[in-house]
Amino acid sequence: MSGGAMRRALAAGLAALLAGLPALAQPPAPAAPPAAAPLPGGPLAIERQGSFFLGGRDVASDALSTLPAYAASGTITVDQVYVRYQVPAGGTGRPLVLVHGCCLTGKTWETTPDGRMGWDEYFLRRGHPVYVLDQAWRGRSAASPVGINRVRSGRAPTDELPTVFSAGHEPAWAIFRFGKEYPQVFPGMLFPLEAQAEFWKQMVPDWLNSLPTPNPTVPALSELAQRLDGAVLVSHSQSGIYPFQTAALNRAGIAGIVSIEPGACPSAKADMAPYRDLPILVLWGDYVDQSSRWALRLKGCRDFAAAAHAAGGKVENAVLSELGIKGNSHMLMQDRNSLEVADWLEAWLTRAVGPRP
Amino acid sequence: MSGGAMRRALAAGLAALLAGLPALAQPPAPAAPPAAAPLPGGPLAIERQGSFFLGGRDVASDALSTLPAYAASGTITVDQVYVRYQVPAGGTGRPLVLVHGCCLTGKTWETTPDGRMGWDEYFLRRGHPVYVLDQAWRGRSAASPVGINRVRSGRAPTDELPTVFSAGHEPAWAIFRFGKEYPQVFPGMLFPLEAQAEFWKQMVPDWLNSLPTPNPTVPALSELAQRLDGAVLVSHSQSGIYPFQTAALNRAGIAGIVSIEPGACPSAKADMAPYRDLPILVLWGDYVDQSSRWALRLKGCRDFAAAAHAAGGKVENAVLSELGIKGNSHMLMQDRNSLEVADWLEAWLTRAVGPRP
């Protein structure tokens, strides 16, 4: 048994002894970040950039259209995932794959609603190749009109219409933790509400509930991780579970997981083998304890972290407000201090994941 | 009367005299392009990049969702147009606004299906700021689920379902002029058919027929042109008419129009005032005469050019196959010779539009 394996076995044994004391079984709180180096300014030097699709499945249908000008019959391709990437000239950071949450697209990671630099450019300037995707059936990743047109043409009953919803500004307000409920605002909350109209424009209809589980985005993430041969999968909210599902599908190519305020972590009763020896960060903003929805999810992720820790895993739950970074909403990559949060995350990536080999 | 105005008046008079002879009334054929300078290689130097939305309209509804977990009532924002932009460091080219066609998104202009450089990067390397958009209700520009959910919840009859269609691979084949009909291929045709599966993934459902005329994309283009204070609007296929509609709405900020294989040009009977003294190119590939659909559209654009010419306008129809560039499909920005076509277009931009003032 190597020294590392022995230490892990001892740690696992100790964790198992402490399993009845979940507060103690938590992994140590993440250290405060070192002061960040200034972000390199000036023109961006991009080695290469472009876009492509992952996955995709052909579907033959006779309900593609109800218009005389467009044929009803033919084949379309769905389930593919659109990816736009940029690779910086120089830099040693691991490739980051940025996955947006519910009712949103890859726009989440680009210019903020109030016009500041998005995380896509921030991490590029820090030397990371950055891959931004649109989940399957959203944004530039095609949905299908077949379920609509079968009903419209009288060939299926209305209850076979697809499940597709949009989040309204008012109900989304509490979910995004701008305040307890619309239009209240948490004291000190840092989302740029003066630009909220620009944020609402980011929201698109969500077909998630018409799709199988795991979402086709998950095997696409696995394909991308393998192609990149060592990527950090960064998810948010509704997609929070996807990197975990991807690791459970296949660990190949996954160098780390950052799950930002996930809708769910894996169950504490799940098989922890997929997460062993994988740097995993679950990142939270502020006001979590003031939202029963999010407090419950944080508790679930703490339970997962404890279970992973007991099994030799290293899942860290970092609650920014407990680390001295206050005021973050659920959309922390767009909050006024988004680059300060990015600095913190960059320090975590440097410490826990390290550079490209 | 200035010398230029007198020349224009004489030209208009001559054109009017020749109106019974439309072949003669055509403007002179575009000159063959000069040999293009090699495209600058190496890392891209980007002064700034980002994304934003244009336009948008709030809609209140009680049919946003049929799921218990997401509220049915609230406000959503639709009709906005997503734009991603990159401004090169250095360069003197006019800003280009790239508008995709039917059933597609801004992906049209990015990496080709067979993995070569897209026109977004080509024109950036030639010194143009490049703005790539997703038309309203497509891609990252939100559609609305209200029309679906009103029917699904029994509050509207099925014939009120939105009109939304997808183009199937097989019927799209002839429209894109890969061949006369699926799966025939025109001799010498240059679309990279070996990568067609990647092209089909670019296609998304099209809500065009559920939208008002002009499409909300048109006022968005006007807003963008004014913001850029001198942009060339580059459209394709279904969006081919949009720059003309934009100019008719407001000429402010429009430095030129490039309409690639438009679904329609303005009518020859339309008011030509919006197009006076505006550099306008209507660009066509090969095999147009072998497609009744496209031959008719080219004829309509020739009629428009003659009418514009007679009124002092300068609309050029350039048919690449008549200029010695053979083999182009309707997707000429993705054909194997896409950068040769781009060189030709860059030469036209230099000659007809010129640099930023």
Image: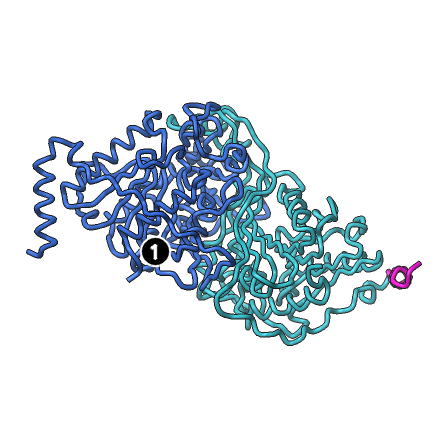
Chain colours: A blue, B cyan
Numbered-mark total: 1
Residue that carries the numbered disc 1 in the rendered image = A224
Q: Position of residue B18 (x, y in %)?
A: 88, 63
Left or right for A53, reference B121: left
Q: Residue furthest front?
A: A35
Res A355 quadrant in image:
bottom left
Q: In the figure, A89 relative to B134: above or below? A: below
Name the amino acid type tagged 1: Leu
Q: Position of residue B292 (x, y in %)?
A: 65, 59
Residue drawn at x 84%, y 58% as measured from the top left: B312
Q: Specify start and end residues of the magenta stretch as a single range.
A: B1-19
Q: Nearer the viewer, residue A154 or A67?
A: A67
Q: In the figure, B29 relative to B241: above or below? A: below
Q: Is residue B154 visible?
A: no
Q: Nearer the viewer, residue A73 or A8?
A: A8
Q: Residue furthest right?
A: B1
Q: In the figure, B287 relative to A191: above or below? A: below
Q: Quadrant of the N terminus of chain A?
A: bottom left
Q: Nearer the viewer, residue A129 or A104?
A: A129
Q: Is residue B316 visible?
A: yes
